[in-house]
Image (cartoon, rainbow, N blue to C red):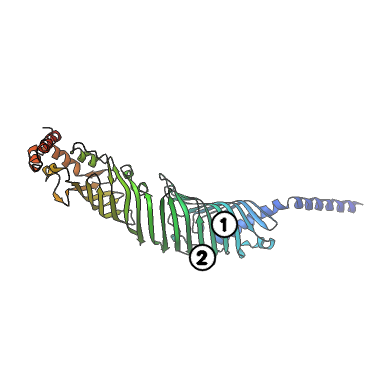
């Protein structure tokens, strides 16, 4: 009798245990899967792995949240949410041993500061993968760098090679209007990257496209752009004085970007030197100087130094500008030739040589030298303008304009006297 009771208790315990396992089997399997998968992925990549809300039902593995940090992967951190993968029961034991097709609702990828080409994934043991991400964000840990946000992406791994593509979303940087991403495609193997092509939008009309490769840390590529807002390119506060839409093309070799650019609808607004010079010409306003022609060639060095040459600019205000120079984070220099049209301005000859050094092609020309730093630029034109306005004799200007008959000479005399305060 006692034996029967003991047996009954044992059977009851087993029944309760079996019932508990049956009713809580999904939670138990999920807990086991979280630990099992995290351990396998960590062993394969060397990364710290965290998984939450993992479950498996009817051949579908799901995870509410996952995170990979560090290790031998070519990125600093990967965070995913709403992951789904078709996995058989047998494959749960070794999910990394077979090809996987995975769908991810959202993901954030944080790249290493030194760039993907410097962080290979040697030693990473992963299966062939086909990843679909509905909403992907890619950024670096430097908050001032570009951020690719909310793009739809696909990544396919075959052997040790990755094939990547994305559409939609936007490219952001602090202080600038976001660029829209049309498309991008790329391939990655070890330290080699090949960006087969990309296309970006800047507002309704602007576009930027190109291709690039990176092998061993050195990028090369070809790029072209159409109607890009000048504010995206200009350093510091230069965008407050200059506006327009840029079009051009460039090539990148060994970190050096060389190209040519033209500006449509260019305008120089409230530039102190232009306003000061206009004060010499009664009745003329140079607060805003539009340009019919504005083009130049440029070279950007790996250290951020930008050199420009072959600058040609012509304004309907009767102004022309030629020259070359450079901009760097700690220095600024330019040697420019500023021309003012002689048409309807016969008295300009009176300011030779105090301001203008020569007359050529219908313009009086003066040299403008710029130096200093981006934070504290200096130039030599303003001082010469002030000196000239105070010292040019009125008689000299009238004599230079003597070929103008009658009242025009009197007008020139009165004008010069008003300019120099005599």
Q: Going by the picture, which residue comes out furthest to the right?
A: 1
**Residue at label 2?**
161
Distance in Å between CA atoms under marks 2 and 1: 17 Å
> Is 151 left or right of 212, judged from the image as shown?
right
Q: Mark 1 falls on what kind of element?
A: strand
| Residue in front for this viewpoint, 410 or 165 | 410
Residue at 29% from the left image edge and 53% from the top image edge: 295
Residue bearing the label numbered 1:
132
Q: Is residue 327 left or right of residue 348?
A: right
Which one is nearer the viewer's eye here, 76 or 181? 181
Q: Nearer the viewer, mark 2 or mark 1?
A: 1
Residue 326 position, x and y percent, is 27, 52
Measuring from the top left, give residue 188's x and y in whole percent: 48, 63
Mark 2 vs mark 1: which is more N-terminal? 1
| Residue 128 showing in the rendered view | yes
**Given the current orientation, which residue lies at the most extreme top position?**
422
């Amino acid at each position: 009798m006692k034996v029967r009771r003991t047996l009954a208790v044992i059977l009851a315990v087993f029944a309760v245990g079996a019932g508990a396992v049956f009713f809580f089997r999904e939670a138990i399997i999920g807990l086991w899967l979280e630990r099992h998968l995290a351990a396998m992925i960590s062993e394969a990549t060397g990364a710290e792995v965290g998984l939450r809300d993992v479950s498996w039902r009817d051949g579908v593995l799901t995870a509410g949240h996952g995170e990979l940090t560090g290790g031998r992967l070519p990125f600093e951190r990967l965070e995913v949410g709403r992951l789904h993968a078709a996995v058989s029961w047998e494959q749960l034991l070794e999910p990394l041993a077979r090809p996987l097709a995975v769908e991810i609702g959202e993901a954030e990828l944080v790249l290493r500061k030194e760039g993907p080409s410097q962080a290979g994934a040697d030693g990473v043991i992963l299966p062939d993968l086909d990843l679909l991400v509905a909403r992907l964000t890619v950024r670096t840990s430097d908050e001032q760098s570009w951020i690719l946000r909310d793009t739809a992406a696909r990544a396919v791994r075959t052997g040790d090679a990755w094939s990547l593509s994305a559409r939609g979303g936007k490219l952001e940087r602090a202080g600038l209007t976001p660029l829209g991403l049309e498309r991008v495609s790329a391939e990655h193997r070890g330290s080699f990257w090949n960006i087969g092509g990309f296309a970006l939008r800047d507002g309704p009309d602007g576009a930027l496209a190109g291709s690039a490769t990176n092998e061993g840390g050195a990028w090369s590529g070809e790029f072209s752009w159409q109607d890009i807002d000048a504010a995206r390119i200009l350093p510091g506060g230069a965008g407050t004085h200059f506006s327009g839409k840029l079009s051009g093309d460039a090539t990148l070799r060994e970190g050096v970007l060389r190209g040519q650019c033209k500006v449509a609808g260019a305008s120089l607004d409230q530039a102190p030197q232009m306003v000061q010079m206009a004060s010499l010409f009664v009745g003329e306003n140079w607060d805003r100087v539009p340009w019919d022609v504005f083009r130049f060639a440029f070279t950007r060095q790996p250290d951020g130094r930008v050199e420009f040459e072959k600058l040609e600019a012509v304004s309907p205000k009767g102004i022309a500008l030629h020259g070359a120079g450079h901009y760097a984070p700690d220095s600024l220099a330019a040697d420019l030739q500023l021309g003012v049209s002689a048409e309807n301005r016969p008295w300009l000859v009176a300011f030779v040589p105090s301001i203008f050094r020569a007359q050529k092609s219908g313009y009086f020309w003066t040299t403008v030298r710029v130096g200093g730093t981006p934070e504290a630029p200096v130039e030599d034109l303003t001082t010469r303008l002030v000196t000239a306005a105070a010292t040019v004799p009125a008689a000299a200007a009238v004599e230079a304009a003597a070929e103008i008959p009658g009242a025009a000479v009197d007008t020139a005399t009165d004008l010069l006297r008003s300019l120099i305060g005599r």
